[in-house]
Image: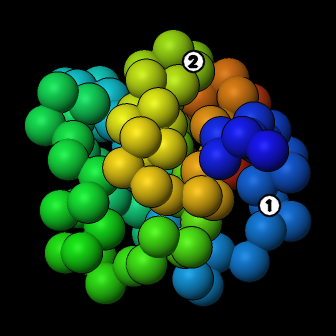
């Protein structure tokens, strides 16, 4: 079974994010233009070191990681980084921030 799963913006609303974390891997300028208002962490894809990041966030290899970009491409690359680092519960938010905004997630 693959460690990487796809999740729609709608399905994300159904998940308990208490033990999980949303990671936005877009550029700083993109994040400044529009971002989720719910708790998330912004780390541009080029700077992402999954093991270091999860340790800094106090998360385990079993914690759910929900990865967000503009439309899904960079999130898939970030998900591969997490899977290669041994994380087993990785989700790519399909459609990215565009789908989240269209699906009713609060953004600013």
- Seen at 49% across and 44% down, the residue is 83
* Picture coordinates of residue 69, whole percent (x, y): 46, 29
Q: Foreground residue, 23 or 30?
A: 23
Q: Quadrant of residue 43?
A: top left
Q: Confirm or deny contact between disc 2 and disc 1 (CB under 8 A).
A: no
Q: Position of residue 57 (x, y in %)?
A: 28, 76
In this rendering, would 74 be left or right of 17?
Answer: left
Q: What residue is disc 1 on? A: 13
Residue at image position (43%, 23%) is 77
Image-quadrant location for residue 4? top right
Q: Is residue 16 left or right of residue 64?
A: right
N-terminal of the pair, mark 2 or mark 1, is: 1
Tell me: residue 5, above or below residue 73. below
Horizontal side of residue 54 vs 60, given as left or right: left
Residue 15 coordinates in the image, percent (x, y): 79, 68
Horizontal arrangement in the rendering, residue 31 relative to residue 104 (left or right) = left
> Which element carries disc 1, helix, strand or loop?
loop
* Residue 106 in the image: above or below residue 94: below
What residue sits 19% from the left and 75% below the top? 56
Res 100 seen here: no
State the mark number for residue 71. Answer: 2
Q: Secondary structure at mark 2?
A: loop
Colour scheme in use: rainbow
On the image, the x and y values in percent for residue 52 come to 17, 62
Q: Residue at x 59, y 66 (%)?
A: 64
């Amino acid at each position: 079974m693959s460690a990487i799963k796809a999740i729609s913006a709608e399905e994300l609303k159904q998940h308990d994010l208490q033990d999980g974390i949303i990671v936005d891997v877009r550029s700083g300028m993109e994040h400044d233009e529009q971002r989720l208002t719910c708790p998330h962490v912004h780390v541009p894809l080029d700077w992402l070191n999954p093991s270091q990041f999860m340790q800094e966030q106090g998360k385990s290899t079993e914690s759910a990681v929900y990865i967000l970009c503009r439309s899904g491409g960079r999130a898939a690359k970030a998900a591969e980084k997490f899977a290669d680092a041994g994380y087993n519960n990785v989700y790519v938010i399909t459609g990215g921030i565009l789908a989240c905004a269209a699906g009713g997630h609060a953004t600013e």
